Image (tube, helix red, strand yellow):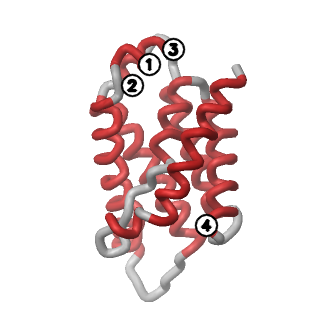
Amino acid sequence: MKTKYFNSILVFIPLVLVQITLVRFISWNAIGPNLILIPLVFFTISNNQLFGTILGFSYGLLLDLFSGGLLGSAMLSFTVSGFIAGYFSNENKRHIYYKPLNFSFIVLLCSIISSIMFSFFTTIDFSRNLFTSIFDEGLLPGFYTSIIALIFIYFYPRRKLIEN
């Protein structure tokens, strides 16, 4: 039981370093992927909704502390994303949710919600249209994150997914 907490934190540490330092180099017009959301969804589907909510809170709090951003913005958006991903945590349907396209759509849903919530609290620009703000700061990063999640889950061994 303690290994699932240890594994999730062990995966988080290198990803937060990559998210803070290297993601800006693969970003396009300040639109970058949210790499931390992918293992959050993965571990939430593997375990349950409560685990995903607590893990999202922990990931968000640590990201806020490491990045120096507005304290609580990533924490709230990741908590809600972990809660939403928890709806797909079903032991009998786990093999269906880990199929590449299904996993990518779950990450897309959670990433869009997380990006919109995060941008709502951090960047409020009254000179822009609401729909273009949602598109630029919510949908585009969500699609970018889901494409990276598709690549990740496609190359992850199937046997390990079924055993979890």
Mark closer to the observer (4, 2): 4
Residue linked to disc 3: 91
Q: How many marks?
A: 4
Mark closer to the observer (1, 4): 4
Measured as percent of width and height from the top left, residue 48 is found at 60, 25
Residue 126 drawn above or below residue 63: below
Q: Quadrant of residue 98 in the image?
A: top left
Q: Nearer the viewer, residue 74 or 18?
A: 18
Measured as percent of width and height from the top left, residue 22 is found at 42, 63
Task: For marks 4 and 2, give the CA distance.
Answer: 31 Å
Residue linked to disc 1: 94
Task: For marks 3 and 2, give the CA distance.
Answer: 10 Å
Q: Residue at x 28, y 33 (%)?
A: 101
The three-letter code of the residue at mark 2 reads: Tyr
Residue 118 drawn above or below residue 52: below
Residue linked to disc 4: 67
The three-letter code of the residue at mark 3 reads: Glu
Label at residue 140: none
**Contact, CB < 8 Å: mark 3 with mark 4?**
no
**Contact, CB < 8 Å: mark 1 with mark 2?**
yes
Task: For marks 3 and 4, give the CA distance.
Answer: 35 Å
Task: For marks 1 and 3, give the CA distance.
Answer: 5 Å
Label at residue 97: 2
Mark closer to the observer (3, 4): 4
Indicate the secondary structure of the residue bearing disc 1.
helix
